Amino acid sequence: MVSSKGFFRANSILESMIALTIISVCLYIAILIFAQVFSIKTSAKYYTSRSSVNELFYLFDLKSDSLVFENYNANLKIEENFLNNSLKEITVEYTDSTKNTYKKVFYIIKE
Amino acid sequence: MLKAHSLLYAIYICLIISIICGGILYYFNLYNQLNNYYNRYEDLYVHNYSTVNYAIGVDLVNEDLPENIENNIKGNFTVSSFGVLQLIIANSSIETDTISSAHLVGELPSSDTAIFLSSISKPLLYSGKVEIVGNNRLPFVEIIGKVIDSKKNELKLVGSTFLNEGGLPSLNREFIKMYDDSNFKNAMSLSNDLNEDSIYFNSFFNQPSIKELTKPGVQNIVYKGNIILRGKDSLVVKKSAILKDVILFAPRIIFEEGFSGNVQAYATSEILIKKNVNLNYPSVLCVYNSTKNESSIIIQENCTVSGAIVLFGNELDDIEKNKIMVDSSGFLEADIYCTGALMLKSNVYGSIYTNRFYYRSSSSSYDNLISDIKINVKKRPSYFVPIQLLNKSKSRYGIIKRVF
């Protein structure tokens, strides 16, 4: 505090404590915001997993039997439900390395 | 050493930190919005494709999909008809975003009949090199060779031949519905002035639009999409016209040399296709003649037609007045249905249903004779969805193509 004609005396310790408190509160808020912004839902891994679930739809359209029976993938849980003679309803659950599961339901024509 | 004034410095530091944090927040907010937008549209596109699959799987019957609880995407589809083809419009929507796609569909599977000849005729004769792959239904089991111009006769038959006691199977009802005037009630009219060098496009998401043509010529103009062209007396389509997915209606329709396009042509007295014309998939050539006048479909040399060729409506007494004449060096990847007489000089990859064949060479003409041609039903591409000629019970559907 600036002292001009002797109202307040300079008191460095109090000042530096207040300064430190303000800086630490600011940093605390900043870290909270960072934690929110860099969450799981915004990581690249999340979008990669969602894209791979969408990719499964196109793969199923091309070669559904080999996906179900041949390549056994522990992360992938596939459920086929035959609605009638030519239509399958497929529920796919994909678990990625962050242990989050993504679920998707779609329809495929059965040849 | 901390000195006085450090409060001021602290406030400066807070200000800088807050500006940096605010900047990062804003940046990541935009990044999130963009990613959510991409993800939402990706899910919508996958759901739309899945909706089209569902529509085909339930044979175009139900109109709404069971609701998807995970993403809140709602889907539904509508079915209408465009010519003799069916049109599916599939919509997927989530809150305020909607995606639509339109597809032309037809009925699978293709039949395995190569020749279906009705039993009012004499036995089928052949001359020259004839190859028939597919099952035949003929009035007499044997195909007899006849020597013409001292050519060597060679017959290759792959497939069985069955006896056929009756007439032709009845034609798909969609064909005769096309000649009904109530078809044009729903359509909007385009303005009637014919501007040359202009492009007319009508999306399949709208109602079909009709253009009544006063002059018979169609040249130097582009018509694409959901458009019906109607001529009062005749329509002459020249090489400079570009037609894609349109329907033509006129008593006489003529395609000039060199034309290439994709049309459904419905006539009542004559369709004439000159040399070197390509009618791409899916094209339909149809003549309906229920009067006592003559009618014909004439396809000259070196033409390719992919789709269906139909001539119907006449009584059995008038077979000689209704003819389909196909000249040599052409290629027909189509099914042919003729209640009159058919002369074939080009190869056909498809099924043929006719009341009678005939063959006219330079010297003479013969009844029920086929000469020097190949008829092969197995050689169509695996994605080929045939245009259904017969009234079969509903079988599976397949996508012909996507339209816009």
Image (cartoon, rainbow, N blue to C red):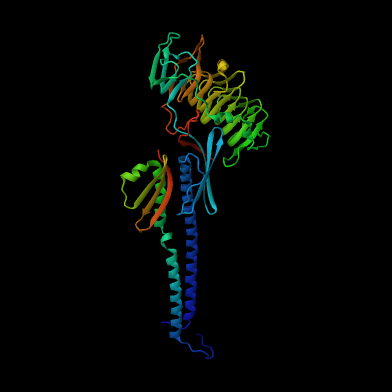
Q: Nearer the viewer, residue B314 or B73?
A: B314
Residue B268, picture quadrant: top right
Picture quarter with the N terminus of chain B: bottom left
Q: Nearer the viewer, residue B83 or A55?
A: B83
Where is residue B29 shown, x and y percent of the image?
Answer: 49, 61
Query: Which part of the image, by quadrant, shows the C terminus of chain B?
Result: top right
Q: Is residue A83 above or below residue B312?
A: below
Q: Position of residue B179 (x, y in %)?
A: 60, 29
| As drawn, B60 above or below B148 | below
Q: Can see residue B198? A: no
Front-most of B271 and B69?
Answer: B69
Q: Quadrant of residue A63?
A: top left
| Whether residue B386 can be seen here | yes
Q: Nearer the viewer, residue B113 or A75?
A: B113
Position in image of residue B116 (x %, y %):
46, 21
Q: Residue furthest bottom?
A: A6
Numbered circles on residues, count: 0
**Residue sitting at x 51%, y 30%:** B280
Q: In the figure, A7 relative to B234: above or below?
A: below
In the image: residue B98, left or right of residue A100:
right
Q: Residue at x 48, y 39 (%)?
A: B59
